[in-house]
Amino acid sequence: MLEVRELHVDIASAQVLRGLRLQVAKGQMVGLVGRNGAGKTSTLRSIMGHLTPHQGQILFEGQDLLKLPAHARAGLGIGYMPEDRGLVPELTVEENMVLPLWVSPTLDVRERLVWVYSVLPELKAMSDRRALLLSGGQQKLVALARALAVGTRLLLLDEPFEGVAPALSMRLSEVIGQLKSTDLSVLIAQSDVNHANELLDAQVVIERGANQA
């Protein structure tokens, strides 16, 4: 499903990825584990087209993502939950959820919303509330819902459990755990595997932008 080959990425004059390699098979849940600053977010941002590698390949179902514009990822069925949530404050919960669906040529907005609300029913009651009025934990749920809305093949989750209360961590684990019975592939970047240890099929440890030997 996803294969990253010998990825090298620089930000300004700093080398943040140094030949990183990873694979995520169809229906597999893989953890990208490393300390803060190890290169986890840079890896996900490179996959999403927000950073431009100067060497290496990112293959999604055999197609080289580096040859595509960034917005094409959503059209391929890739959903992304950034660490900082990345919501548009003035838009409502539902408007934030459907944003990536607008660039998908195949997905039906209403059908995807019905499915997401079935997975995260607590969001239905706040669907018309502006994102800026939500708590940090609620914003995490919306960011996950947005990724689920468009991520029909692959989900990229950046530190989904970071900075949230234990009860919400359990809820996020529950929702992500439900995906294991599907064909959806999931790559979870996090500093440790305490919250997702039982969910993961495999893990890749990253240190200073490279695979840990």
Image (tube, rainbow, N blue to C red):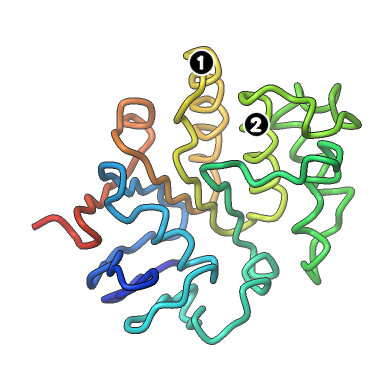
Q: CA distance from mark 1 to mark 2?
A: 12 Å
Q: Are marks 1 and 2 in contact (CB under 8 Å)?
A: no
Secondary structure state at the residue bearing disc 1: loop
Q: Quadrant of residue 114?
A: top right
Residue that protrudes farthest toward the top in the picture? 167
Residue, x 36% and y 83% (percent of image)? 54
Q: Is residue 129 above or below residue 108?
A: above
Q: Which mark is residue 165?
A: 1
Q: Amino acid at mark 1?
A: Ala
Disc 2 designates what residue? 141
Q: Is residue 56 above or below residue 121?
A: below
Task: Give the x, y percent position of residue 148.
Answer: 66, 46
Of the 4 image quadrants, the one containing the N terminus is bottom left
Q: Amino acid at mark 2?
A: Leu
Task: Give the x, y percent position of residue 109.
Answer: 86, 53
Of the 4 image quadrants, the one containing the C terminus is bottom left
Task: Give the x, y percent position of residue 147.
Answer: 64, 48
Secondary structure state at the residue bearing disc 2: helix
Q: Is residue 206 left or right of residue 145?
A: left
Task: Give the x, y percent position of residue 58.
Answer: 42, 75
Q: Is residue 16 above or below residue 136?
A: below
Q: Is residue 53 left or right of residue 83?
A: left
Q: Is residue 91 left or right of residue 206?
A: right
154 and 207: which one is in front? Answer: 207
